[in-house]
């Protein structure tokens, strides 16, 4: 993402990235600089991903690291060189390390850095076989993945099944691991937060995780560097389960990032597309692409209008004919103007991606969105209450949409009425023709979401957003945004959000700034400067919820909101994960199958 100077000084890095770079810099890089000799860096899959998220090979070369190797692959010995091992403290990684030095060493010496606490049995095993080869052994406490400026994950999509499957054997172990990863996040941010969780009479996971995290934080921060007990910092950590808002992951979202990841097959943040001459191209959508960072939270209508405008500005600056902007025109311009290639390439990628999104939108999504929004919000565009949600759903079921889209619509109907009768559900399942795959719908009960119920519950009250400007097909606001704003305003109900441990004074007073008001500096703000709200969603976070963290931070200014989870959700992925919670062969939709209505 950066030049050598940026990497070493942390300049230009977003918050989580900055802290991760600092952690690596203070340990691995600082030790590297003590010796002028060239070294080899050996990584496992997690640390490969972690390191590539915040630095480039050229940054490492500047620190006398000559080559990066895979811990799990067989490698030729290089006896005259020292090796740096950056790895997770797992049995597999430690065994691979031991194999490098037993019976014969592959390298002159080993400098070992673990992402997290190394269990005693693994550490003792290493000592037993490799003690004389190890020069350094440190734990650097970074076992989470910095995903974006204000987003982190635990890089563990499998946690969903471990926590929510009724047949899971490793739920307790998974929650323990997530707690350890959350502690390393707090340690990296240098925050000792107060911990709260969303109380739910049917589900215990948030409470269990809050207890685990709080106990582990207390142990970690027992003594600070000067040997004193560290007090709580100006931070609060809220833990919530996925079932708390089942609507946001299922709706068709029309903001650029969420829409692209829902409708286009983007794997590992890589968008693959064909240029007009038929050549296969790909682009990585990350913090390195400044145009992506600028556009990702905007509505697709704005993005579609802005990109051609940007291209026109470039073409005007080169006195190009200002006709209709197409991919073909851009290809011609790029041939003629090598100096503008990078700028244009970036814009071409987004012109193509926005076009792809709009193609799906006009084919199917536009018609679906009105019904989805009415079901989710409970009222139509004019604000008139939806009295009979079934009348809103039926046209969707009668239209030749894909099975996947119909399942999403049926789920939104069930969520909107807080569960339906067994008889009604059977009719809906027959309509969608998923008699053999009822689990797509039934398994939501494992997340504590009511699916079959005879008791009618009222819709929970939401914040009044009637004065906010919204697009007709984007009226829904993720529930987590209400929570963020209420937390920042110190208005979270203590009965609903019990304190696992008390938060610092700044989170207990009144006078916090509303996320919807214009920011006015005050003494309260001064007291809260630099305070952080960290939110962890058990079971996956959506792109629309990630966007909320930026929106609230932008509106409040005095508090930064950071959000994370075990992994990031897409609607397709979640629907498939829900089905696979129960036994039986797993059937999944690919994006192509799903789009063939």
Image: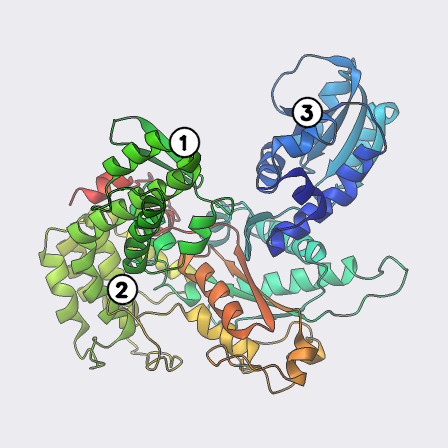
How many C-alpha atoms fall within 10 Å of the one at disc 2: few (<14), some, or many (≥20)? many
Picture coordinates of residue 422, whole percent (x, y)? 23, 65
- The answer to which quarter of the image holds residue 188 is bottom right
Alpha carbons under labels 2 and 3: distance apart: 48 Å
Sooner in the amino-acid sequence: mark 2 or mark 1: 1
Q: Which x, y percent locates residue 429?
A: 19, 56
> Image check: 211 left or right of 285?
right
SS at circle 3: helix
Measured as percent of width and height from the top left, residue 317 is found at 36, 46
Q: Identify residue for label 1.
A: 338
Q: Nearer the viewer, residue 64 or 382?
A: 64
Compute the Cα span from label 3 to label 1.
47 Å
Mark 1 crowd level (few <14, some 14–19, many ≥20, 10 Å Cα): few
Q: Nearer the N terminus, badge 3 or badge 1?
A: 3
Identified at 18% across, 66% down, the residue is 424
Q: Which is more toward the observer, 300 or 485?
A: 300
Residue pointed to by mark 2: 412
Please tell me which residue is depicted at 68% across the width and 46% down the height of the picture: 21
Q: Are marks 2 and 1 in contact (CB under 8 Å)?
A: no
On residue 96, the disc is 3
């Amino acid at each position: 993402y950066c030049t050598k100077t940026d990497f070493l000084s942390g300049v230009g890095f977003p918050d989580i990235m900055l802290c991760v770079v600092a952690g690596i810099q203070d340990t691995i890089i600082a030790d590297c600089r003590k010796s002028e000799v060239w070294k080899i860096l050996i990584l496992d899959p997690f640390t490969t991903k972690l390191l590539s998220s915040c630095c480039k090979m050229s940054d490492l070369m500047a620190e006398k690291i000559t080559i990066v190797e895979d811990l799990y692959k067989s490698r030729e010995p290089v006896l005259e060189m020292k090796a740096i091992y950056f790895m997770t403290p797992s049995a597999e990684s430690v065994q691979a390390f031991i194999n490098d030095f037993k019976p014969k060493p592959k390298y002159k010496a080993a400098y070992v850095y673990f992402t997290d606490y190394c269990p005693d049995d693994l550490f003792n095993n290493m000592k037993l076989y490799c003690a004389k080869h190890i020069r350094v052994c440190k734990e650097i406490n970074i076992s989470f993945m910095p995903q974006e400026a204000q987003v982190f994950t635990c890089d563990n999509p499998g946690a969903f099944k471990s926590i929510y499957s009724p047949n899971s054997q490793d739920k307790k172990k998974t929650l323990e691991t997530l707690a350890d990863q959350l502690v390393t996040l707090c340690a990296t941010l240098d925050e000792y937060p107060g911990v709260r969780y969303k109380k739910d009479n049917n589900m215990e996971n948030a409470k269990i995780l809050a207890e685990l995290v709080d106990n582990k934080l207390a142990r970690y921060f027992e003594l600070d560097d000067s040997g004193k007990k560290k007090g709580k910092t100006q931070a609060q950590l809220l833990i919530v389960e996925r079932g708390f808002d089942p609507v946001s992951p299922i709706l068709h979202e029309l903001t650029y990032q969420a829409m692209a990841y829902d409708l286009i097959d983007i794997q590992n943040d890589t968008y693959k597309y064909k240029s007009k001459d038929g050549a296969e191209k790909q682009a990585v959508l990350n913090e390195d692409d400044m145009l992506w960072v600028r556009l990702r939270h905007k509505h697709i209508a704005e993005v579609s209008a802005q990109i051609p405008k940007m291209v026109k500005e470039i073409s005007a600056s080169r006195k190009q004919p200002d006709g209709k902007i197409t991919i073909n025109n851009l290809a011609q311009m790029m041939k003629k103007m090598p100096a503008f290639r990078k700028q244009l390439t970036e814009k071409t990628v987004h012109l193509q991606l926005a076009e792809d999104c709009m193609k799906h939108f006009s084919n199917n999504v536009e018609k679906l969105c009105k019904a989805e929004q009415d079901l989710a919000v409970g009222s139509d565009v004019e604000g008139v209450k939806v009295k009979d949600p079934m009348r809103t759903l039926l046209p969707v079921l009668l239209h030749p949409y894909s099975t996947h889209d119909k399942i999403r619509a049926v789920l939104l109907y069930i969520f909107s009425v807080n569960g339906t009768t067994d008889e009604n559900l059977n009719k809906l399942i027959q309509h969608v023709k998923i008699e053999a795959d009822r689990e797509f719908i039934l398994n939501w009960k494992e997340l504590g979401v009511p699916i079959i119920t005879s008791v009618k519950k009222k819709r929970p009250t939401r914040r009044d957003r009637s004065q906010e400007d919204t697009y007709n097909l984007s009226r829904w606001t993720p529930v987590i945004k209400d929570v963020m704003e209420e937390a920042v305003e110190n208005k979270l109900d203590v009965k609903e959000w019990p304190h696992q441990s008390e938060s610092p004074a700044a989170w207990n007073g009144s006078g916090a700034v509303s996320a919807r008001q214009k920011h006015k500096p005050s003494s309260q703000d001064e007291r809260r400067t630099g305070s952080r709200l960290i939110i962890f969603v058990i079971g996956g976070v959506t792109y629309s919820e990630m966007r909320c963290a930026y929106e609230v931070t932008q509106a409040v200014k005095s508090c930064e909101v950071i959000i994370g989870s075990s992994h990031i959700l897409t609607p397709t992925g979640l629907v498939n994960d829900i089905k696979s919670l129960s036994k039986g062969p797993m059937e999944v939709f690919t994006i192509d199958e799903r789009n063939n209505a």
